[in-house]
Image (spheres, helix red, strand yellow):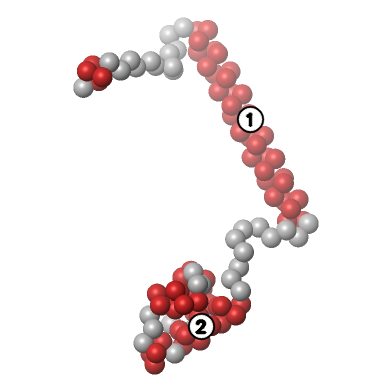
Amino acid sequence: MIETLQVKLVDINETANPLKSLLFKVLGSFVQFERYIIVERTSDGRERAKSRGKHMGRPSQPRRNIEEAIRLYNSKNTNRSSVKDIIKLTSVPNAPLYVEIKKNNLE
């Protein structure tokens, strides 16, 4: 099938030639060094932002939405609402809702 598509395969990890092998290893070392520098800069910036009081991550749900979802969860037997319905009504994602349910021992 490859022959019919006239695809040519080139192996860039050719180590038969010592000069090519050296060049490949040196370039690989530069790439690895650059990656380490990027990771270091990113973590330093994250630490500086945290020390200045910046919130990291996704914004939390408004407390009133979570309280409304918990209220609906507590009365789900009387109003016949499922957790999926509660999530749609309050727009609280399921993970924070289940965290609150577990925190309040409502299971």
Residue 104 in sight from this viewpoint = no
Q: Measuring 78% from the left and 57% from the top, which residue is drawn there?
A: 52
What kind of residue is marked 2?
Ile
Toward the right, the furthest residue is: 52
In the image, residue 45 above or below residue 100:
above
Left or right placement of residue 89 versus residue 47 in this view: left
In the image, residue 76 above or below residue 62:
below
Looking at the rendering, in which quadrant would you find the C terminus?
bottom left
Residue 101 in sight from this viewpoint = yes
Residue 70: % across, % down: 51, 83
Residue 30: % across, % down: 61, 24
Q: Residues within 10 Å of mark 2 (few under 14, many from 20)?
A: many
Left or right placement of residue 100 versus residue 13 in this view: right
Which sits in the foreground, 68 or 38? 68
Q: Measuring 54% from the left and 13% from the top, which residue is drawn there?
A: 22
Provide the residue designation for mark 1.
34
Element at label 1: helix
Which sits in the foreground, 39 or 3? 3
Residue 68: % across, % down: 53, 83
Provide the residue designation for mark 2.
70
Q: Measuring 76% from the left and 50% from the top, which residue is drawn there?
A: 48
Quadrant for residue 44, please give it: top right
Mark 1 or 2, closer to the camera: 2
Nearer-N-terminus badge (1/2): 1
Residue 13: % across, % down: 44, 17
Quadrant for residue 6, please give it: top left
